[in-house]
Amino acid sequence: MRPVPDIDPCEVIIDTAKYLPSMSEIPEEFRSEDKWLCAQSDLCKGHLTPKEGVNADQAFRVISAIQSSFDPTYRHKRAGVAFLLSEWFEDYRDDTRLPDLE
């Protein structure tokens, strides 16, 4: 597990791309649709359970900083945030989506 950087709340708007893993560090599965990409796009709707030892507020500060940065491409930010969410949180559950009906 990657450690969660401790960033100052004011730093959230300055040089935030440095917290984003490079594309070569992000496993391929985080570049296509999966639950972590859903978590990335629905952070306020779902439920994330932090892994043991992870400060959720600190992790969300880093995630927010990355998502608000202008430097990286949208695809890079999206994959990086999905990857970091999987590193710092046990699972993601979206209570707003309807179950699949068969």
Image (cartoon, rainbow, N blue to C red):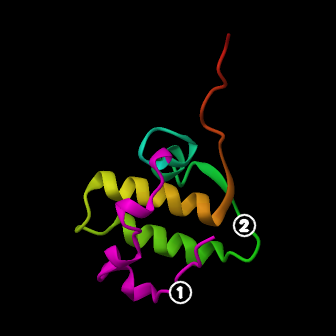
Does residue 5 lie above or below 80 as drawn? Answer: below
Span shown in magenta:
1-29
Q: Residue 86 is drawn in which quadrant?
A: bottom right
Q: Mark 1 touching mark 2, by CB under 8 A?
A: no
* Residue at image coords 46%, 89%: 8
Residue extending farthest top: 102
In the drawing, what numbered circle is on residue 92?
Answer: none
Quarter of the figure with the N terminus: bottom right
SS of the residue at dot 1? loop
In-image side of 66 versus 74 (left or right): right
Residue topped by disc 1: 6
The x and y percentages for residue 55 are 66, 77
Residue type of the residue flagged with mark 1: Asp
Give the alpha-carbon distance from disc 1 to disc 2, as whole Å: 16 Å
In-image side of 6 versus 46 (left or right): left
* Residue at image coords 53%, 40%: 34
SS of the residue at dot 2? loop
Residue 15 in the magenta stretch? The answer is yes
Does residue 47 lie above or below 16 as drawn? Answer: above
Residue topped by disc 2: 51
The answer to which of marks 1 and 2 sits earlier in the sequence is 1
The x and y percentages for residue 84 are 52, 63
